[in-house]
Amino acid sequence: MAHTIVIFGASGDLTSRKLIPALYRLFLRDKLPADTHIVGVSRSKFSDDAWREQLATTTEKFTQKDFNAESWQEFAKQVHYVPGDIKDASDFDTLAERLNGIEGQRSADRVYYIATMPQLYETAAAHLGASGLADDSEAARRIVIEKPFGTDLATAKKLNTAIASVFREDQVYRIDHYLGKETVQNIMVLRFGNAIFEPLWNRNYIDHVQITVAEEVLVGRRGDYYDGSGVLRDMFQNHILQLMMVTAMECPSKFNADSVRDEKVKVLGAIRQLRGADFADCGIRGQYAGYRSEEGVDPNSETETFAALRLHVDNWRWNGVPFYLRSGKALSCRTTQIVIEFKEPPHMLFGGSTTPQANRLVIQIQPAEGIQVHFQSKVPDAEMKTRQSQLDFRFDSGGLALPDAYQRLLQDALQGDASLFARSDEVELAWAIIDPIIGAWRSPAAPPMNSYPVEGWGPSESADWMRKDGRNWFDVCPVIH
Ligand code: BG6
């Protein structure tokens, strides 16, 4: 079967920075199905050749040493451009004609990738429906929706309803690029492809879980968007809750879209609802020093650039095991890691240790990818003194380059595998968890906004808050390099 991927928002940043480089790399690795056409749509008036030329420059920049002019020429033959305005229904009729021309007599499975401003998602779906472009009686029709998927529960529901009036749920692919990361998928392999971890993966052995997504960058040119969003919408509702779901879910009976997502959704459903006084103590808010002078940011902004949250999963496996989640901009380094902190040994046989004796599993998602196990070993030639030692696993050992998340996600969308995309109930439940926190943190009862210096681990109150629970953040920049 032939394939066509239609990218709405073709002149945007995401298309040139991520989508086309990912498709080109799939092509280089023979992973782009044969007979695949890529059609860009946006308001700019490019010809096919002008768009190809522009993409050659940007793709070279973003794929660097993978780029070569000869293979680009081959790839570019499959690339087309159709000027069109999403708001204009008649442009969809023109697009339909052009697609029929490009595909010729063969019927082709189509993926419509909506990489536009979020305000246009609903219109795009509606016009695809009205023009007949969503009709899948002859071949598959799928729609890929970029993030953000709504800005709260009400808008996410509205968007789901609008899309559902045109596409069935199995045709809808909601992007969370964290799910496309190899190391996130590897969490499932670590847990469900091995016999030694799963027996320990519960309240009997685990004291708590920490999920940190630390970013070194400031808001930069995105001040305008970010100030209306804040870290809870930007990182928690999507990426961090995805990491939490994959860490906490039960083993699905099959690895397919429904089974995997059913298990993930159960985790969200089991997260304890916060009420009343919980909101003041469930987390810490912070804003980096200088944020209010960033371009596009309100000088009196009360938007968090850092947050830490403590959530509980009320089920048999996790009862009593807190999940500490945190993320922020302007921190010491870029690192995404999940720390599984085990309980202390029940009986301390050996004295003289200078470090805590609990075992730890550090799953490092990025930038370097790997896993580290912390365990006690004997200090040589020092009676029975112990010290903390490490076992390291590097994910790319063997010289295998890790693909960008978008490669995997585009490939799956073309092949019709939605396992690594968010389902409508997943997105809504995630908002139902984050919305009340945002609401409470915008109310007079909000916990104080703490300022923090650029290049640290967020406000000092975050460490104090953790210590009150008798625990410490694992503040280590990538443990594996
Ligand atoms: C995006 C957020 O979804 O994820 C950004 O909007 C953030 O603010 C980015 O920087 C982080 O993604 P990654 O893959 O670099 O960790």
Image: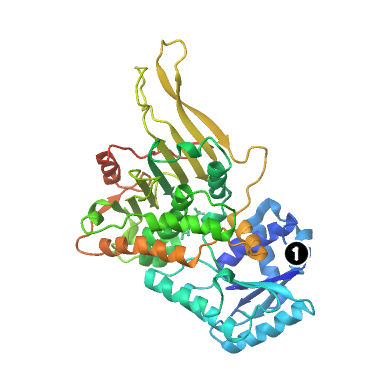
Residue 275 appears in the figure: yes
Coordinates of residue 313 in the picture (x, y in percent): 37, 50
Coordinates of residue 460 in the picture (x, y in percent): 28, 44
Of residue 207 and residue 229, the one placed in the foreground of this image is 207
Left or right side of 477 for 89: right
Among the 4 quarters of the image, the one containing residue 36: bottom right
Coordinates of residue 261 in the picture (x, y in percent): 51, 58
Left or right side of 285 for 318: right
Q: Residue at x 72, y 61 (%)?
A: 32
Q: Residue at x 58, y 42 (%)?
A: 193
Tell me: residue 137, above or below residue 268.
below
In this view, the residue farthest toward the bottom is: 90
For label 1, the SS is helix
Tell me: residue 340, above or below residue 42.
above
Q: Residue at x 27, y 61 (%)?
A: 441
Identify the residue position indicated by label 1 in the image. Answer: 75
Among the 4 quarters of the image, the one containing residue 285: bottom left
Check disc 1 and give the amino acid type. Answer: Phe
Please give the count of numbered marks on the rendered protein: 1
Left or right side of 214 for 309: left
Of residue 104 and residue 252, the one placed in the foreground of this image is 252
Residue 21 appears in the figure: no
Q: Residue at x 36, y 44 (%)?
A: 457
Q: Is mark 1 within 8 Å of ligand 1?
A: no
Q: Dot 1, how many residues are within 10 Å of its Cα: few (below 14), some (14-19), or many (20+)?
A: some
Q: Quadrant of the C terminus?
A: top right
Coordinates of residue 267 in the picture (x, y in percent): 42, 54
Q: Quadrant of the N terminus?
A: bottom right
